[in-house]
Amino acid sequence: MKNVLIIGATGQIGSELTMKLRREYPEGSIVAGYIRGAEPKGILLESGPSEEADVCNGQQIAEIVKKYHIDAIYNLAALLSATAEKFPLKAWDIQMNGLINILEVARENGCQVFTPSSIGSFGPSTPHDDTPQDTIQRPTSMYGVTKVATELLSDYYFTKYGVDTRAVRFPGLISYTTLPGGGTTDYAVEIYYSAIKGEEFVCPIGKGTYMDMMYMPDALKAATDIMEADPSRLIHRNAFNVASMSFDPEGVLASIRKYIPDAKMRYEVDPVRQAIADSWPNKMDDSCARAEWDWKPSYDLDEMTKDMIKHLREKLL
Ligand code: AKB
């Protein structure tokens, strides 16, 4: 994999994935794809090519793929779960019509494609503990509906046309570089910012609500390792459960208090986010990813907290 197009390169995952790929493939073109109003800035702009790449504009994507001889596309364009509940048609348009544009371009140009799925692809009837790789997927949110359809459509393009589609089901992702926006798991990032600023955190997710979470370096490793995995070992493709930690708001607060003892939190539960969180797994079983492409995370909750606090202190204080 040498020439890569990242669609959504200025978002939470894209901003860090683009930089990682540029470090790992200095000889290739790692193109930062953005939409108008979310242009790359600073090091992201200066360290490599960038192009306007609207997932809903198949022609625009095809031109970029041809111009840079793109081998792989990371399709990270999505409205996250809480925002998708507000704008379900827009979420459908970006996540489904956008995806089919990408898959068609990939089919015509021989590209590999990564379109992430999520813990959001599961629903209330899914087993919530040790959620298996292959299990019931009947989500009740628009985000979840699009994520299940993403998995199916990506598998379809692989079996029908041989497009090399691969993906993981991301947990809530925690990072200090770019804030997420509109997700159910965003609280697990925001609580760190509040603690560093000495502000009381108002938590929109209720006590005892466990969800899978992951630190960004592990998420980026999952995204690149699955794309480089030996295809002869892959029994699954779209998409693998990947897990590293599971906690509720009390758990992350307790971890932060090991470093910032006076960190404060109170609850003001948002019913929309809470309903989504309640329908998602408490903790996924990722043994297929471990067996088929040697997935292994590096960070647990306390290791992540230590690193987050160190970097956020440098960034914010
Ligand atoms: C969200 O909360 O919507 C996302 C996700 C888990 O996919 N972070």
Image: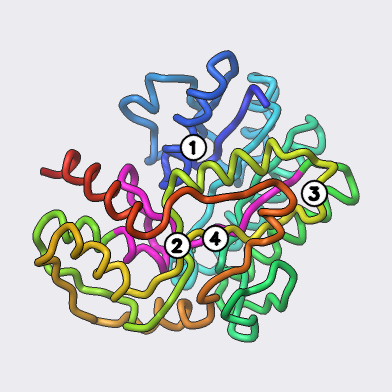
SS at mark 1?
helix
Query: What span is in magenta?
Result: 165-189
Verify CB contact (< 8 Å) between mark 1 and mark 2. no
Q: Specify the quadrant that holds the C terminus.
A: top left
The residue identified by callout 2 is 213
The amino acid pointed to by label 4 is Ala
Question: What residue lies at 51% left-to-right and 43% top-to-bottom?
Answer: 220
Verify CB contact (< 8 Å) between mark 3 and mark 2. no
Could you tell whether 235 is left or right of 127 in the image? right
Question: What residue lies at 60% left-to-right and 53% top-to-bottom?
Answer: 116
Q: Earlier in the sequence, mark 1 or mark 3?
A: 1
Few, some or many residues within 10 Å of mark 4 (<14, 14–19, 20+) = many
Alpha-carbon span between mark 3 and mark 2 = 24 Å
Question: What residue lies at 58% left-to-right and 46% top-to-bottom?
Answer: 222
In the picture, the disc for residue 17 is: 1
Residue 178: within the magenta?
yes
The residue identified by callout 4 is 243
Front disc: 4 or 1: 4
Alpha-carbon span between mark 4 and mark 2 = 7 Å
SS at mark 2?
strand
The amino acid pointed to by label 3 is Leu
The residue identified by callout 3 is 234
Q: Earlier in the sequence, mark 4 or mark 2?
A: 2
The amino acid pointed to by label 1 is Leu
Judge by depth and name the residue closer to the eye, 25 or 42: 25
